[in-house]
Amino acid sequence: MADQPGNDLNFPDPAEFSKNMAKIASQSQRLVTEFLKNQTEDSATGDADPLNIGGAFLDMTAKMMADPTRLVEAQMGLWQDYLELWQKTTQRMLGQEVDPHVSPERGDRRFRDSAWDENQIFDFIKQSYLLTARWLQSTVSDVEGMDGKSKQKVEFYTRQFVDAMAPSNFVMTNPEVLRSTFDSNGENLVNGLNNMLSDLERGKGQLAIKMTDLDAFTLGENVAVTPGKVVYQNELMQLIQYTPTTKQVYKRPLLIAPPWINKFYILDLRQDNSFIKWAVDHGYTVFVISWVNPDEKLSNKTFEDYMQEGILAALDAIELATGEKNVTAIGYCLAGTLMAATLAYMAAIGDDRIKAVTYFAAQVDFSEAGELTVFVDEEQIKSLENRMEKSGYLEGSAMATTFNMLRANDLIWSFVVNNYLLGKDPFPFDLLYWNQDATRMPAAMHSYYLRNMYQKNLLSAPDGLELGGEKIDLRRIKTPTYILASKEDHIAPWPSAFKATGLYSGPVRFVLSGSGHIAGVINPPAAKKYQHWINEKKKTYKTPDDWFADAEEHPGSWWEDWDAWLAKKSGKKVPARVPGDGKLDVIEDAPGSYVKIQAMD
C-alpha cells in the first residue's frame, strides 16, 4: 500500500499524537455529558417516534416478506455486483487498467479527493459504498403494495441513512481526514470536537452546525446594503421603500413580499447579485416587506393576519407614500402562496389594486409538493403542534433542519466533515449566513399552513378556504401573472409550481430557470450562469413535461425577460419618488430593525 498512488500519509509523532488523543478523550466526555444533560426535557415527552418512521418501515418490511423471491433476487444482484467489483479490483492490483464498476453521480463532492480514485483501497471502499447505497435505495423503491405516503417516507429516510453512512463521514475511511490526522498529530480532531461543543452550546443542547463565519457579516454593512428607508411598520412587518437611482420611475410601484420562513435580504445579499438593487436600477419604485421574527407574544397570529397586516397593509402604506393606488407585486415561496390567496380574496371583494403579479418558486396546488410532504402526516403535525404549544412558535432551527435534510450531503454532511473531522472553520459565505439566520413561525399560522395547504390542499379547491369572511377561489384571479420556477428546486418542485397555470383566469407567463430554490431566482444577468426555458406557443398544456417539450432554452438569467414583461404593465414614467416625501415619515434606515432580530436573541 505504501507505493500506491494517492497514498501520501505521514506517520504521526507518537508523543504529540498521544497528547492529542488524551485531549480528545477529555473533550468527548464533556461532549457526551453536555448532550445528555440537554436531552432530559425531550425524553420526558414520551414520544419515541414523533415522525412515525417506525410504522412506515414496519409496513415496508411486511410487504417485503410477502414476496421473498423478489428480496432474494435483489440480494443475488448485489452479490453479483460485489463479485464484479472484486474482480476489477484484483485486476487493478495486478497492474491492469480497468474502468470503475460504479461511479459517483456528477456533482457528488464527497469523493473529490484524488485518493478516492488513485488509491486502490479507498477506490474499493468508495465503490462498495456506492453499490450498497444503490442496491438499498432501489430495493426499497421496488417494494409493491405500500401506500404512497409510507413509500415516500421510507424512501426519504432510507436516503438519509445512506447519506449518513457514506465512508467520507468517518475518520478511518476518509483519506483526506486520515491525511490531516497524521499530518497534524490529531490536532484536527481536537479542533473538531471544540467546534462541536461550540455548536451544541450555541444551539442550547441541539447541534446547530455552523455553516459559515457568523461574525463576518453585519446587516446594513456588507449584506442588505441597498439604500432605503423604513416608512411603515406594525406588529408583523416593516415596509422598506428603496431610494431611487434613476431620475424617472415607472408609475406603478413594485411590492415584494418575501417568505417569512427566512429573511428578506436573500434578495439583497451583495450589490452584484441584489435583485432589489437591480430592480431599483431598472426604474422601479421598490417596496419590500421585512417580516418580524415572531416570539411567543405573536403566537396567535394567523395566515389571515399575514394577509391583512402584511400585503394589504403594505398596499395602503404604498398609496400614502407615493399617492399611487395601483401596484405590481412579487410573492416568493410561502409569500407567493399568501399572495395568491390575497389576490383571490381581493377578487372576491372587488379590489383590483394589484395590476400584475409575479411568483418566485411558489406553490398553490400542493397535490405534488415534493419531499416536504414527508413531514406533514397527521402524527408529525400533532407532534409539531405539541412542541409549538409550549413556546407559541416553531423555532427557526427546526425549519432549517427540515430544509437542510432535502440536500443532506451539501447542507449537513459536508460541514460535519469540514468542521468536525478536518477541524476547520467554515468559509465566510453570505448565502449561508442568510441560511443560518433562521426565523420562527407563529404556532397558529404554521399549523394552519401545514394542515390546509400541504395536508388538505384546500387553496387550490374552489371556495376551499375562507379569508376575511370571504370564500376564496384562485380561478377568480384575472391579474396578469408571471410564474418563475426552478428546475432543480427541492422545496417548491417546478411541476408543482406549474399547476398554477391551470388555475388562474388571467394571462399567465410561465418561465423555468436552471438551478434550485435560491440560485434559480438570485441569478443576475451579469453572472451569465445557468439558463432558462420559455415557451412562446399559444397553447394550453396539461402537464409540465408537455410544456417543457415545446420550450426553448435560453442562456443565462431570466431577469431581463421578467423586466420586459413587467415594464409593459407598470405604467408610464414619472419623476422618481424619494422615501419620506409622501405622507409617510421615515422611521429608520434600511434594512430596518425587524430583520436584525435573531432567533437565538
Image: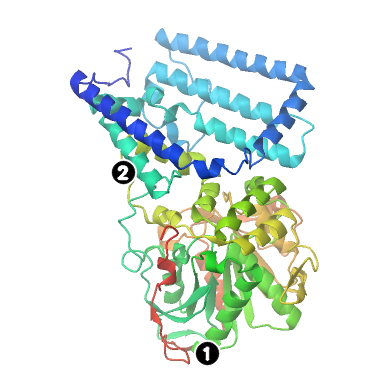
Question: Where, quadrant-wise, is the C terminus in this rendering?
Answer: bottom left
User: Where does the image place residue 520, in percent across and percent down from the top left?
Assistant: 52, 56
The amino acid sitting under disc 1 is Leu
The foreground one among 536 and 348 is: 348
User: Where does the image place residue 155, in percent across and percent down from the top left?
Assistant: 65, 35
Give the side of residue 291 with respect to residue 76, left or right.
left
Q: Residues at badges 2 and 1 in contact (C-beta under 8 Å)?
A: no
The foreground one among 484 and 445 is: 445
Residue drawn 66% across and 47% down?
380
User: Real-space Cα distance between discs 2 and 1?
Assistant: 48 Å
On screen, residue 128 above or below 308 = above
Residue drawn 41% across and 7% down?
94
- Name the element at disc 1: helix
Residue drawn 68% across and 31% down?
57
Residue drawn 57% across and 51% down?
489
- In this orientation, does residue 407 appear? no
On screen, residue 556 above or below 403 = below
Q: Which residue is mark 2?
A: 425
